[in-house]
Image: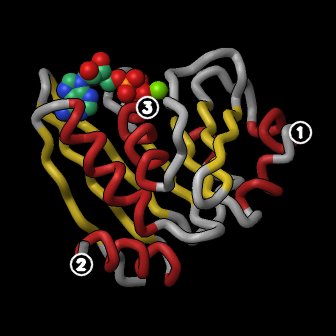
Amino acid sequence: MVKETITFHTNTPEETESVGERIGQVLESGSVVALIGELGAGKTILTRGIARGLGVPDLVHSPTFTLIHEHQGRLPVYHFDLYRIGSTQELEDLGAETYFYGDGVCIVEWAERAASVLPPDHVEIRISGNDDRRTLEIHAYGPVSRRIIERVKAG
Ligand code: ADP
Ligand code: MG
């Protein structure tokens, strides 16, 4: 399959948040966004921007002890933080697949820990960098996520 990709470079947390906002504006019902990057990479900051782009009024926070945070924007937004996940079984017990294949938008931090249960067609964002510079590589893995990336490029 030909992968659709787009790369952004940011120099501040605010810039990363704006990239997120731009992505959030073009997501659709059923979109799944998989975030991959080390602790402190900027996954939560990016999630905050995506949520803002989806019209979520409340602030998205860093991990707490819950794995799923629910927000309401123009679509329901389910923010997963799998930092403390023990096993894939734990995800299945939470009914993660109901969210992944539901009508809302799922944003998943530490998505590599959910690899076996993520829908094949998802938007993957890899964040890397150091100091204040970050590289965000966005990949599509199917027709829906390709459409989203096309819209991000157009926007
Ligand atoms: P994660 O959720 O990946 O663990 P966070 O989003 O909670 O990471 O934190 C990212 C940290 O990196 C914040 O302290 C933020 O201020 C800092 N930072 C510095 N430069 C950037 C940048 N360009 N984009 C995003 N975060 C940045
Ligand atoms: Mg985080």
Residue 44 spot, x, y in % from top left: 43, 31
Q: Residue at x 42, y 81 (%)?
A: 147
User: Which residue bears the numbered disc 1?
Assistant: 93
User: Which residue bears the numbered disc 3?
Assistant: 44
User: Which residue bears the numbered disc 2?
Assistant: 154
Q: Residues within 10 Å of mark 2 (few under 14, many from 20)?
A: few
> At numbered mark 1, what does the secondary structure look like: helix, strand or loop?
helix
Q: In the rendered image of this protein, does residue 50 appear above or below residue 3?
A: above
Labels 3 & 2 near each other (Cβ < 8 A): no
Ligand 2 within 8 angstroms of badge 1 C-beta: no
Say which label, 3 or 1, has the lower sequence index: 3
The amino acid type found where label 2 is placed reads: Ala
Give the image quarter of residue 128.
Answer: top left
Say which label, 3 or 2, has the lower sequence index: 3
Quadrant for the C terminus, please: bottom left
Residue 133 spot, x, y in % from top left: 12, 33
Q: In the rendered image of this protein, does residue 54 appear above or below residue 151?
A: above
Q: CA distance from mark 3 to mark 1?
A: 24 Å
